[in-house]
Image (cartoon, coloured by chain):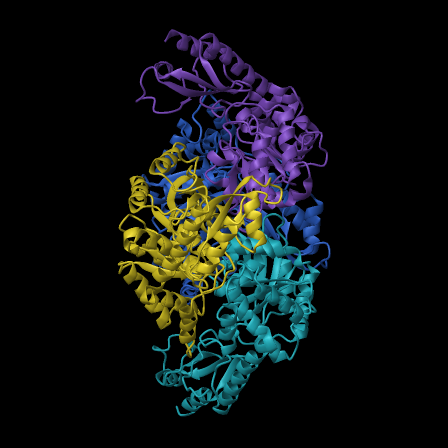
Chain colours: A yellow, B cyan, C blue, D purple
Amino acid sequence: MTDTVMHFASDNGGPVPPQVLEALTRANDGYAWAYGADPVSQEVVAGVRALFEAPEAAVHLAATGTAANALALACLCPPFATVFCSPVAHIHEDECNAPEFYTGGAKLTLVPGADKMTPEALRASIQAEETRGVHGPQRGAVSLTTVTERGSVYALDELRALCDVAKEFDLPVHLDGARFANACVALGCKPAEMTWKLGVDVAVFGGTKNGLMGAEAVVFFDPAKSWEFELRRKRGGHLFSKHRYMAAQMQAYLAGDLWRDLATRANAACARLATGLRTAGIRIASGAEANMIYFEATAAQHRTLKAAGALYHASGDLEAAAPDALLLGRLVCDWSQSEASIDRFVDTLKAV
Amino acid sequence: MTDTVMHFASDNGGPVPPQVLEALTRANDGYAWAYGADPVSQEVVAGVRALFEAPEAAVHLAATGTAANALALACLCPPFATVFCSPVAHIHEDECNAPEFYTGGAKLTLVPGADKMTPEALRASIQAEETRGVHGPQRGAVSLTTVTERGSVYALDELRALCDVAKEFDLPVHLDGARFANACVALGCKPAEMTWKLGVDVAVFGGTKNGLMGAEAVVFFDPAKSWEFELRRKRGGHLFSKHRYMAAQMQAYLAGDLWRDLATRANAACARLATGLRTAGIRIASGAEANMIYFEATAAQHRTLKAAGALYHASGDLEAAAPDALLLGRLVCDWSQSEASIDRFVDTLKAV
Amino acid sequence: MTDTVMHFASDNGGPVPPQVLEALTRANDGYAWAYGADPVSQEVVAGVRALFEAPEAAVHLAATGTAANALALACLCPPFATVFCSPVAHIHEDECNAPEFYTGGAKLTLVPGADKMTPEALRASIQAEETRGVHGPQRGAVSLTTVTERGSVYALDELRALCDVAKEFDLPVHLDGARFANACVALGCKPAEMTWKLGVDVAVFGGTKNGLMGAEAVVFFDPAKSWEFELRRKRGGHLFSKHRYMAAQMQAYLAGDLWRDLATRANAACARLATGLRTAGIRIASGAEANMIYFEATAAQHRTLKAAGALYHASGDLEAAAPDALLLGRLVCDWSQSEASIDRFVDTLKAV
Amino acid sequence: MTDTVMHFASDNGGPVPPQVLEALTRANDGYAWAYGADPVSQEVVAGVRALFEAPEAAVHLAATGTAANALALACLCPPFATVFCSPVAHIHEDECNAPEFYTGGAKLTLVPGADKMTPEALRASIQAEETRGVHGPQRGAVSLTTVTERGSVYALDELRALCDVAKEFDLPVHLDGARFANACVALGCKPAEMTWKLGVDVAVFGGTKNGLMGAEAVVFFDPAKSWEFELRRKRGGHLFSKHRYMAAQMQAYLAGDLWRDLATRANAACARLATGLRTAGIRIASGAEANMIYFEATAAQHRTLKAAGALYHASGDLEAAAPDALLLGRLVCDWSQSEASIDRFVDTLKAV
């Protein structure tokens, strides 16, 4: 691509790759059974199982990451318990109480930390929650996210250590994988290596942020909760009657490992951006390990970028800030980012 | 079309018309703001308002009818109240407690009746619910459905009479319009004439059963609850990040009144089916007023049809029934039904 | 007692017997551990187990019948399921959606019938609820009530037959025992004979309507859900810190079978009322099997009774009714009813 | 009193004063209307209004503090919003998710701080919660507690400053007054001066911890939510049928300002304890402003106290701690504490 639009606000702003539209067109052939009984939906379940090397896993689709997360957590955490997660977790900050809603009123306990969770902090939080017997919430589940909301990627050892802490307390582990593919590519690992082999019980294999219109696969490695998930999904209004169109997106995503290809592009774009920022003397505050970067720039720099049309989130009150005040900016790359756009962003920054 | 597959199980089994795929392709152009801030989404809001002659209305999309209904009801009915609906209402029978979930535990009070609700039955049910003060649920809302789940279409006068009863008690009216277009076509009326002009407060303008992949417009004629709806939608995991693709479907649906064209086709197919059934001496038990028919046939006839590949729902235990036992069958037509398929169905029936 | 106040509105209007106040005074001795860890609370658990011949049972107190019922049902029925109950059940008509609230949005399916449930009607309702797979609510639990809200008492065989139907479908049985003691006395049976020996899984052993200030024992014959109940009770705000005072009431209730003595008095009062009504030529519409009567009288008769100070519920619009219009009245006796009051009621009626 | 039992575990462990038993006995006179329609209940509503100088206030009773808090918050905070409270708030730590349950899934946002909330911290937390539009929870309500869970009492100016911050954002203020009387006595102020005159919208006037068996008055200074509260209370199973017995407790509490007398005793006991601790060279970590003290002692000291029979909570692992390790202990006094008991505690400590 050769566009130079500098759109880095989110990885949910780009277009879908042609394979997705083609799959939709293919799926649009005559009559199909509704609610997931069609052949494409069946094929996709088999495909995700194969990809995760988990032939017994329960695999269900949901159209949004919020639904995928909240439904999964509702199967893991009763209403009188709590989910341990990061203070910056999407389930806490960006889902308008969806986990509380779907669990029937469970709590989220915020494990202190600015980005990646540490095993020590997780253990301390879990331990603290069990001194009150019937009075406090019970320990319910642990929710992890990689790529994190700050752009970091857990090393496999780090993830394993967190899972181990959860297991010390017999707690199930949920993995918010909105950017699963980007993390997988960053680590150069297989999906199984990032999930059940470490102790993850339920993983969201996200597609929406990585090039689909709206499709996430929720993978329960132990299928015991499969039917409960289906009932909760229906009750939440998330069982699609024309399920084949959601499945077709996932079908395209799996075919030829498109998911990996798309994430590889997004990560590469991000790496190019990071390199550019560094050459421009810009400090990278966090991320740049997959497809997201938090960088520090002056208000003057941010204003120049915005004036040039760059789209991204900047913290604080950009209008009111002094020209040399340092503000954080967040850049997210999806598969469709052009090199030209990235280079223009960096050049604009250098020119300030 | 010339297929002869005899697929009458539901109007959610057919393909989408080419205009929908074209709209998706058009919408797939570069970067777009997420969560409904894109131009297509904005255009669709304006389009639905224009179609309903309701320039102030709040218009929001949801991907499933269950979500659209449950979210709308949650804005109308507090958790300590009850929704008056038909015993065969989709919200009661086919949404796995989604209205109870989204309202936070409100009840559904079933107004006695086998199909269309009568004003007398509605009034009696509402009156009965207010003899217990704080002890019983409060009166919350009235939910109507047209085309009904038995294939009937309320005359405008009938709908108005029901709305009038609701207004006697200051109750808001929700219209489940999963088959809104089919009803509109059957009545030859405009959307406004079937909704706010009669006293409907919130209407679901269904697209999914009438040719879209998954898109319903929830129309609040009084926009006071608009923001609450948005928050409840987000909390329910129903705010699509890549909103443009849901909106594009609705865009195609509105363009050139495609919604009316599709429903006209479905209703015409149903009329052809009904005529055929009657010429075959088959009794039509209900429906045949829009795109759904309940018909009575012997077990032997049902078996022959099924053996020939016809897909539809038959009541009772078809395998165990005596050959001349009369069982109900349900036939639903969508826009894509071929005349050949319909004729083959009728001919198969005649040949028994 | 010699009062002649004719108070038959409910069995929650009378005073508590002196034993209850004495027990409160006894319990009010110095310091006690909170939340049920005090000796009285422990003694009461043992006492209820002994009474029910259920040494393994989980026994927990709640202050209101609504709380006892709703908490019990929440342990039996998941939010995507339904509770089968009578259309006149207290849980449906008089708890302002408490079961829906505590279960997290489960439904109540009303088994057709005007009073006692029949096994055939129950079976038909359960069967009807399983034709829709993921779309309809799942079968959750069966809730029975004896004494019924119409004053009837199930024979043990009738209760057993209903439990058997529930067991056919592997459904747990909840017994709303707000008037448990009155039913027990009417049948001349032991608590065990009316509960677990028939297949009841959870019984509410009601005390409030039978002479306590506010105390019900929830008895889970299988203690597996005991901890979940405790957590739900705490979450519902129903775990009393000064638990000893709720327990003391139950202690008094158990001592010397006071519960049986109180119910014997109430039932006897009701029998005297019924005899009086019959001698006055009044038709008894239902009840008169324990401590509640529905009777049919003319509006003129009701007016005379009310004018004389009688307190009870009469159906319909008593003020507007023609003098000879027949209206139902409901009379409920508690342990404290005087013979003089009953006789005056009957005499007043005869004098019309 | 002359007992020397050293019971300082909580103010919910002591007996009730004789006035409460007398009031129960008085209320136990013949028939009374149920559900709060009795004269005692009516009198108590008037009494609380008079006490708070709030003739229009809605006043409702609840039997537990958790119920009072959760029901009040449910009237203030919609399910898609958040309640700002202290990390050590009872509603967060000790109610097993009751606020989340009653609000239908709202969140609690923990305003950083170890004890009393500061206006700056509150403002920062509120501001932080409104950067995400529909994605994050909305600002719902502010919940304050005085006496705090660390034994501190807000000065009236401090409370006013917090209310002012809430009002900046149009947020209603809930006051958890489990120890309302103790705070009032500590400040030497009137209830109105500690509530609506500062901007508190709903106050819980707690009785249970201050000598009642189980009764709290929830006071809405603006009665607009009164009926909603009643419905939510009924739905929560917290409407007592024999309401007169809960009301009688509050009646005794109000009569002759018993509430103030009881709290004065508890606070005096606490002051004596604090003085004793200080003379023993013990550091008071927090509290000692009303009826609760956190003190720092060595493990050896704690062990001696416990061995002597003192009942109170000590932090950490007392058994495993080194003899000179400093551990926090919590002492709470209720109205019934004897001077002898307090002196024995101090003497025991001095003797180590």
Looking at the image, which residue is at 39% across and 90% down?
Answer: B352
The count of marks equals 0
Of the pair C72 and A129, the residue shown nearer to us: A129
Q: Quadrant of residue B216?
A: bottom right
Percent x, y of residue A174 = 37, 49
Above or below — where is B202 with respect to C350?
below
Q: Quadrant of the N terminus of chain C?
A: top right
Of the pair D122 and A129, the residue shown nearer to us: D122
Left or right of C307? Residue B253 is: left
Percent x, y of residue B106 = 55, 54
Residue D120 visible, this angle: yes
Residue C338 visible, this angle: no
Above or below — where is D40 with respect to C313?
above
Q: Quadrant of residue B223?
A: bottom right
Q: Residue furthest front?
A: A351
Of the pair D300 and D310, the residue shown nearer to us: D300
Percent x, y of residue C273 = 57, 47
Of the pair B39 and C272, the residue shown nearer to us: B39
Percent x, y of residue C211 = 52, 37
